Amino acid sequence: MTTLKNKFFYLFLVLLMPGLSACRMGRNYERPSVPLPAQFAGVPTGDTLSIAETSWKEFFTDPVLQELIDSALKGNYDLQTALTRIEASGQQVKQAKAAFLPKVSAQIGASTSLYKSNSLNGISYNAFLGADHIEDYSVAVNLSWEADIWGKMRRQKEAALDQYLQTYEAARVVQTTLVADVAQGYYNLLMLDAQLSIARQNVALGDSILTITRLQKTAGDVTELAVEQADAQKQAAALLIPQLEQSIQIQENALRILTGALPGTISRTADINTITLPDHLDAGVPTSLLSKRPDVRGAELGLMAANAQVGSAQANMYPMLNITAGGGLDAFKASNWFNIPNSLFGLAGGAILQPIFQGRQLKTQFEVAKINREQAVIAFRQSVLNAVGEVSNALVSNSKLKEQGQIAGDRLNTLRQAIGHAQLLYRSGLANYLEVITAQGNLLQSELDVASIKRQQLSSVVELYRSVGGGTK
């Protein structure tokens, strides 16, 4: 009768387990509402394509810049560190998958117990076995398995996978930032090259003006003050040369370090004025940031992991079913150890464990997990808001810098004509030295401004490319 009851119990347990294992604590992930406009400012409705789809090799066509970016992607230490985090997180995923498998252990043991005739055990052993000691030899395989009734291990696996993907997105964030930083540094280097050339040209121009002024002083047309003013203007242009050379070397070192190389010079032939900008810079629609921006995607994966951890913490509060089994060989004499089947033994059991005194601790863990999920929701929404803001700012900068570039170019042309006229008038005595020096100073500043605005234009394009998620391909 008892045997029949046991059979019914195990049959009931086998039939019940598939239904229980289908349970899963916690709610499945649903993306929370996020504040997204229908379109970016200044972008026509329906413009869904994005420059994020363009690979960096197609977006940046300068061969020197391409080589620098390629070297940075291979040698940058920050990116290498991010890739090792992916490997470490991958090991956590493997561990989470292994939780579904039963725990198996092997054991080999040998023991002997010696009792003298004055002890109760000694009297018993002498009476029944005719010996004052007993030996025991065993070899066994034990198995233990926790049935994932409430989906705890499935939630843990889900969280581990989301965290793994989050480290992958974190590495992509490093890559997009690295591509942008190298491009920004390279364009800044070209701007410094242009400004250095401008400073040298102005020193040469200052020399010619100083020569004319000295000749006029010799002729008695101007005073020594005019010579000193012309010399001071030339020295102001000359002072820029070592300052710009210093900035160039520092920028070269910074770029080399980004590529994982020692500080040094960077060979280049491009001129900032020959760098062309893409005709169309499509930012796509704001909703595309949810899939294109790696930091936004990473924040959402963090939220997904936090949601899964809530389910795991909730499952810890419910009963746990453990199934154990074992078997092997056991004998009290070494000579009978492998006497089969007489030395065989086996055991099986199951237990349902319900936490009692840990209730408050488990409840606290559950509540903390829910709070962490709410924090992850906030972080996700903040990342989306920041992304929209960065793209909007880049679009505004790109548009307004085009206008500034046009105005600065027109002003430069005007000042170049003005300095030519001033020199002619000065030679003929129709303009004084102050007018010439003022025209030269204005020309120098305007040329420096044009180079700076061109660099800002290039930087705004790079920032737009990064902010929409470009640079991962």
Image (cartoon, grey):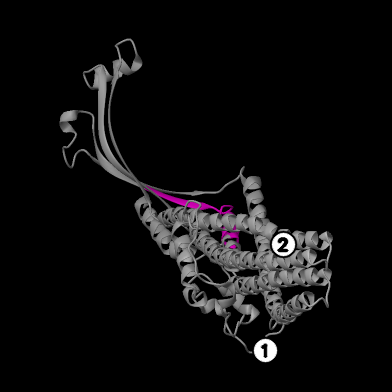
Relative to 366, is 404 above or below?
below
Residue 333, percent across and down? 20, 28
- In magenta, the rendered stretch is 306-324
The stretch drawn in magenta includes residue 441: no
Residue 469, percent across and down? 57, 72
Residue 259, percent across and down? 48, 58
Question: Circle 2: is it few (<14), some (14-19), or many (20+) Cα within 10 Å?
Answer: many
Mark 1 vs 2: CB contact within 8 A: no
Residue shown at 64% from the left, 68% from the top: 201
Q: Which residue is mark 1?
A: 44
Residue shown at 59% from the left, 52% from the top: 317
Residue shown at 18% from the left, 42% from the top: 341
> Circle 2 — which element?
helix
- Residue type for callout 1: Pro
User: Would you say 222 lies left or right of 328 here?
Assistant: right
Front-most of residues 231 and 90: 231
